[in-house]
Each structure stands twice: as C-alpha cells, then as structure tokens.
Image (cartoon, grey):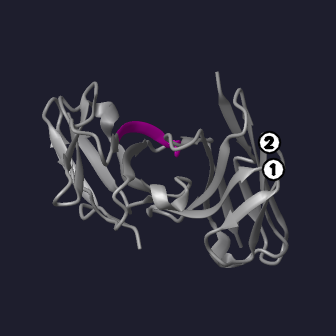
C-alpha cells in the first residue's frame, strides 16, 4: 500500500536561511508523482512543486526545490532564503499511476516556523 | 481561469443532524473532483473522488456520501452526523494526473 511519511512535526529556521523538510514514501508502482503543498493558517492548500518518478532532474520552482532520491524513496523539499511568510504547514503527497492517477495521499505534515 | 468554491465556510451541527457541503468548479470541463477531511493538526484523508457525472469512488467506509449531479458540482452529505465527523473538509479538483487545486475549506464542528 502506498504511504507517505513526514517525520518532522515541527521545524524552526532563521529568516534568510535554507531549510529542508523531509519526506519518504513507499510504493511498488514504478510510475508515480510526488507533490508538495503549503497550508497557511488560513487553511487553504497551495501547490508548490511536482516531481515525476521518471524525471531525471530535480524539480525547482523559484525558492523551492525538490531533492529527489529515488533509490532511497525520499523527496525532500528545500526552501532557500526563508521568509516570514513561509511559516505554515507543509504536506508531501504522492499519486500512483496504477490507481488510475486519481488518488493522491498525503503525509501528516511538517509545521515550519520562520524566526525573524 | 479556473475557480473552485465550497460552502458553507463554517458550520456547527448537533449529533444526528444531516449535513450538506457543496463544491463547484468553474472554467474547466470534466475535472476530477475530490473530498478530503483534515482532523485538527493532521494530514489530509481522502474521502471520495469522482472522474465524471454520477461516478463516485469511496475511500473510507463511513456515514458520509458524495454525489456529482453536474460536471462542475460535487456534494458531500450525511444523514446523521457523528462527533467523529468534526474536521476541516476540503474540496479539490485536478485535470488528469496534474496537481490538486483546493477550495477554501469548510470547518465542521459536531456537538
């Protein structure tokens, strides 16, 4: 069964520094997609970045990059130059192709606190 | 551009009362639609997803049900709410295998 694990309930980072949020996953499907979402205190879920299992390059979107290590089944999110507005919950998620590509499961999340 | 709306934003219901949460999507055709529930401080649990009108897949057996009467409309219902139904309900849509786009969420408190 597919599974997403985020082992860091909370993380602190100093403003302007980089931070890595961990995510490991478990799947037997060779074709899958990995996503990261941000949830501010308002509750909305915001898509940040996507990595496909066959992508050769690590995904990057502005200050966000995904450190994809397929053999280790990890997909860590790196946020560079942290800003106060980055304080939020961050969720790692996975979608497997063998479910018709329609089911996305989420990890428990990591709460990030950015300190001024 | 595509937009997604869900309502009501908050509601407080007594145990045993019915529930209806509605979600609508505009600006896209034949989207995949989803209902997720988030318990306080927890991750998202997939409840239902739909790939077309009248097509509903249930992920978690419970006293909730979902319906998709129109391509752009997704409804979450219950005939009798339980205390354990309290949570933050999120509707989302996607095109194909793409990322999910979420609504604003509905916070349900069952007393």
The quadrant the N terminus of chain A occupies is bottom left
- Considering only order in the chain, which callout, 2 or 1, is on the residue closer to the N terminus? 1
Residue under label 2: B71
Disc number placed over residue B53 in the picture, else none: 1
- Label 2 sits on a secondary structure element that is loop
Residue B78 picture location, percent across and down: 80, 69
Q: In 3D space, how far apart are the residues under numbered discs 1 and 2 (Cα atoms)?
A: 5 Å
A44 falls in the magenta region: yes
Bounds of the magenta segment: A42-50
The reply to whether discs 1 and 2 touch (Cβ–Cβ < 8 Å) is yes
Q: Quadrant of the C terminus of chain A?
A: top left
Count of numbered circles in the view:
2
Callout 1 secondary element: loop
Viewer-closest of A94 and B45 = A94
Front residue (pair B92, A86): B92
The answer to whether A5 is drawn above or below residue A85 in the figure is: below
When the figure is inspected, residue A30 is found, relative to residue A57, above or below; the finding is below
| Residue A65 position by quadrant | top left
Dividing the picture into quarters, in which one does residue B13 lie? bottom right
């Amino acid at each position: 069964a597919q599974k997403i694990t985020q082992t860091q309930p909370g993380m602190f980072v100093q403003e302007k520094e980089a931070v890595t949020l961990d995510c490991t996953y478990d799947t037997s499907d060779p074709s899958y997609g990995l996503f990261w979402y941000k949830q501010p205190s308002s509750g909305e879920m915001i898509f940040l970045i996507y990595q496909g299992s066959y992508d050769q390059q690590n995904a990057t979107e502005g200050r966000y990059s995904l450190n994809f290590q397929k053999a280790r089944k990890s997909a860590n999110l790196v946020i560079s130059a942290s800003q106060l507005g980055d304080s939020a919950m961050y969720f790692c998620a996975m979608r497997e192709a063998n479910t018709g590509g329609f089911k996305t499961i989420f990890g428990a999340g990591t709460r990030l606190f950015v300190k001024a | 551009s595509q937009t997604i709306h869900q309502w009501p934003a908050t509601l407080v219901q007594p145990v045993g009362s019915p529930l209806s949460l509605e979600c609508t999507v505009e600006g896209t055709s034949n989207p995949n639609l989803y209902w997720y529930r988030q318990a306080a401080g927890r991750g998202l649990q997939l409840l239902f997803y739909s790939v077309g009108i009248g097509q509903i897949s249930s992920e978690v057996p419970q006293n909730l049900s979902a319906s998709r009467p129109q391509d752009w409309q997704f409804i979450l219902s219950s005939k009798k709410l339980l205390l354990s139904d309290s949570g933050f309900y999120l509707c989302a849509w996607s095109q194909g295998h793409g990322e999910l786009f979420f609504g604003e969420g509905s916070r349900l408190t069952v007393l």
